[in-house]
Amino acid sequence: MPLSEFDIIKNCFASRTIQRDDVKIGIGDDAAVMSVPHGSELVVAIDTLVDGVHFPVGTSAELIAWKSLAVNLSDLAAMGAEPAWFTLSLTMPSADTHWLEDFTTGLFKLADQYQLQLVGGDTTRGPLAITIQIAGYLPVDSAMTRCGAQPGDAIFITGTVGDAAAGLQFLQSGDIKADHSGLIGRLNRPIPRIETGLALREWATACIDVSDGLYADLGHILIGSGVGARLELEKLPLSNAFRQAVERDEQQWQLALSGGDDYELCFCIASEYVDAFTTQFANSTCPVTRIGEIEQMPGMRLFNKDKLVDLASLQSGYQHFR
Ligand code: ADP
Ligand code: MG
């Protein structure tokens, strides 16, 4: 017997989510009610993933669910916020029990890891699309934004860049070897940098999560802050798997700068705090790499070992991923 909308809400969602003390009314009423800690501000983000647009048709439900939540968590990480609750709008062509089981497995694997409670949503029939709205909080006036970078600030990035873009390229070309699984994993199962975002709140003058490629997203910081930047291409943190899979320098830079789906944090640190920051983060489980400097002159200038690199020479790769 097909599942009714009410069965789905009860069996797949209401009974599966954790219960937080700060949720007064969760799934089941007309709206959810939560209490925000005294002295905190509410932080909200939303993202939609559409079948065939944000993930290839045929992607497993578990991975779709994971990614839908992970991209939202990444937005809160970039603000330095502590995630707490989320709502889910699920539109799907039919109520397939196995698909829903896989979907909830992926969803709650990630949600439970961050003590996130699903507090409501909407369930409708139609072409597959998933919208998640996430909410969390941070101390009053402590949000990291795109607008605070100053000339002289050092530019940092967490983790490695380009892996997901390389994974996508291999998936699309059908050239999948066993040693590409790590890269494809980065594409399908991004790990949001929540703990790092919380720690950066004390340090960063500006922060953004890299979803559309480092070039575009650092560009948002530059525009928002009314500054420019110098980027050192040879310092871009690249994984061993990426270096092995993508050999030429130019190709590496293209993917690392303009491929999307990294979900790393790009942030700026005032020059006088760089040494203290680097010492503090030396033993962090999340590596951070200094990749450039904020400058007064607008625009982004790319250098390879102190030699200016012509952006046009990287354009073909850039277009390829637009
Ligand atoms: P209404 O018609 O008042 O909007 P619904 O029948 O859509 O109510 O939803 C009933 C309850 O189930 C609400 O609390 C709603 O937030 C919750 N809900 C519906 N769909 C989902 C979902 N996909 N995930 C979590 N909660 C959901
Ligand atoms: Mg509704």
Image (spheres, rainbow, N blue to C red):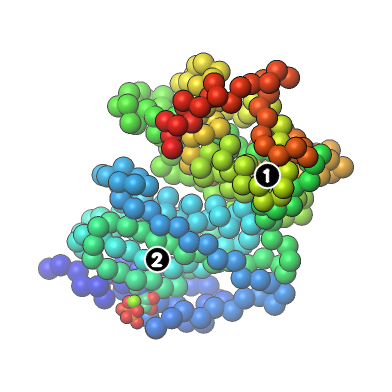
Q: Which quarter of the picture shows residue 118? A: bottom left
Badge 1 amino acid: Leu
Residue 248 appears anywhere in the view: yes
Q: Which quadrant is the N terminus positioned in?
A: bottom left
- x and y percent of residue 144 in the render? 69, 56
Residue position marked by numbered label 1 in the rendering: 222
Q: Residue at x 46, y 25 (%)?
A: 316
Q: Which quadrant is home to the C terminus?
A: top left
Q: Are marks 2 and 1 in contact (CB under 8 Å)?
A: no
Where disc 2 sits, the SS reads strand
Mark 2 is surrounded, within 10 Å at the Cα level, by few (under 14), some (14 to 19) or many (20 or more) other residues, namely: many
The residue positioned 55% from the left and 24% from the top of the image is: 312
Left or right side of 61 for 4: left
Among the 4 quarters of the image, the one containing residue 123: bottom left
Mark 2 to mark 1 CA distance (whole Å): 33 Å
User: Ligand 2 is found in which quarter of the picture?
Assistant: bottom left
Q: Residue at x 30, y 50 (%)?
A: 51
Which is more N-terminal, label 1 or label 2?
2
Q: Residue furthest right?
A: 272
Task: From the image, state whether disc 2 or disc 1 is nearer to you.
Answer: 1
> Eyeballing the image, is 130 above or below 5?
above
Seen in the image, is 29 located left or right of residue 142? left
Please, is residue 193 above or below residue 130 in the view?
above
Give whichever of 241, 109 is nearer the camera: 241
Q: Amino acid at mark 2?
A: Leu
Q: Assign a secondary structure to mark 1.
A: helix
Considering only vertical position in the picture, is 93 above or below 23? above
x, y (%) of residue 161?
Answer: 56, 34
Query: Which x, y percent locates residue 185?
Result: 43, 37
Image x and y of residue 58, in percent: 26, 44
- The answer to whether 229 appears left or right of 61 in the picture is right
Q: To which residue does mark 2 refer?
A: 88
